[in-house]
């Protein structure tokens, strides 16, 4: 029996309120614009027992594997065309997406951790009363910030394949409503700006750790000689936030690191499209 649960449509209607001041003779009046958001929260789980584990570990405990997905699926965002956003979310969930989100979720459930090593047999549930090793892959896709001009989705994947510890990584989808496209690093940043962007990230990291030099960052668990311009970034307010997953620029124990760089400090590196999106948050 398939342990699969896809929730019925949970519609979340959120009203984004934007205030714009009129002329001085009507200074006490404001206008309210309504930005309708309709989403469906989809979740699915599938459990497996890993057959053939003893061929690799003679004294192995029973090994199981679990796949769980929770997807905040956008149905309507302010009346804009969001098909490219939906396609990008499906690709982030499964590298070869199917024709619909439900089919894509089901395909992702077919590829649990350990499937390249063991023979996977689907089961209803994983026993809780015995000592076991459980591999897992959890994937969560959710909107983390939005404005009337853009929305940002985080795709977070937590997995464990039997090693020393699990791993959690994130990627981000920045979607421009007007141009109906995802803002990639190539679209966001002008060519030849890596050095300027790197310097801005380094300076912000030093400010976050309250140090004055790159060498001092090592005392705070930052690998100062490994800092790079992360391709994982997202727009938030007045910032470009560069995201670093565990091991990118710090030990695993440090976890992920987000470095918010005020956009006006790297204005000359930003494309007109990104400047337009960020400027739309200004009063």
Image (tube, rainbow, N blue to C red):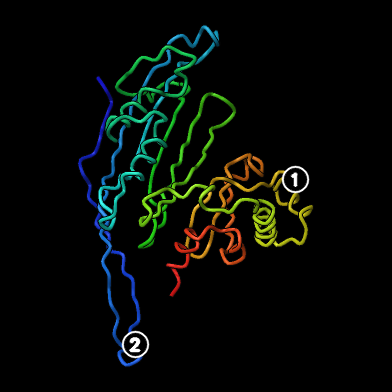
Q: Which residue sits furthest bottom?
A: 25
Q: Which residue is mark 2?
A: 23
Numbered label attached to residue 182? none
Q: Which residue is mark 1?
A: 225
Q: Which residue sits furthest left?
A: 8
| Vertical placement of residue 172 versus 21, above or below | above
Picture residue at 40% right of the left edge, 51% below the top: 175
Residue 199, by quadrant, is bottom right
Secondary element at image label 2: loop
The location of residue 269, given as percent across then percent down, is 60, 58
Secondary element at image label 1: helix
| Vertical placement of residue 239 versus 139, above or below | below
The location of residue 245, given as percent across then percent down, is 57, 42
Which quadrant of the rendered structure holds the N terminus? top left
275 or 214: which is nearer to us? 275
C-alpha distance separating marks 1 and 2: 53 Å
218 or 178: which is nearer to us? 178
> Within 10 angstroms of label 1, few (less than 14), some, or many (20 or more) residues?
few
Q: Is residue 190 left or right of residue 128?
A: right
The location of residue 8, given as percent across then percent down, is 20, 40
> Within 10 angstroms of label 2, few (less than 14), some, or many (20 or more) residues?
few
Nearer-N-terminus badge (1/2): 2
Which label sits in the foreground, 1 or 2? 2
Picture residue at 31% right of the left edge, 33% below the top: 44
């Amino acid at each position: 029996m398939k342990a699969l649960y896809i929730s019925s449509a949970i519609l979340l209607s959120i009203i984004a309120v934007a205030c714009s001041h009129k002329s001085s003779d009507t200074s006490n009046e404001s206008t309210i614009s309504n930005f309708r958001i309709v989403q469906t929260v989809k979740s699915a789980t599938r459990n497996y027992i890993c057959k053939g584990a003893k061929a690799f570990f003679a004294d192995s405990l029973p090994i199981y594997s679990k796949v769980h997905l929770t997807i905040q699926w956008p149905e309507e965002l302010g009346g804009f065309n969001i098909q490219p956003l939906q396609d990008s979310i499906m690709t982030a969930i499964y590298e070869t997406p199917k024709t619909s989100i439900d089919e894509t979720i089901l395909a992702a459930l077919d590829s649990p951790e350990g499937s390249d090593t063991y023979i996977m047999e689907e089961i209803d549930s994983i026993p809780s009363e015995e000592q076991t090793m459980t591999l897992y892959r959890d994937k969560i896709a959710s909107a983390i910030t939005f404005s009337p001009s853009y929305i940002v989705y985080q795709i977070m994947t937590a997995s464990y394949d039997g090693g020393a510890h699990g791993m959690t990584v994130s990627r981000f989808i920045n979607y421009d409503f007007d141009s109906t496209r995802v803002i990639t690093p190539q679209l966001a940043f002008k060519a030849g700006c890596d050095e300027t962007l790197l310097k801005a990230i380094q300076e912000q990291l030093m400010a976050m750790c309250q140090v004055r030099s790159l060498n001092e960052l090592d005392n705070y668990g930052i690998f100062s000689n490994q800092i790079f311009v992360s391709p994982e970034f997202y727009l938030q307010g007045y910032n470009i936030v560069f995201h670093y997953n565990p091991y990118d620029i710090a030990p695993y124990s440090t976890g992920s690191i987000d470095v918010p760089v005020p956009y006006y400090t790297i204005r000359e590196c930003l494309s007109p499209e990104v400047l337009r999106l960020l400027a739309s948050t200004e009063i």
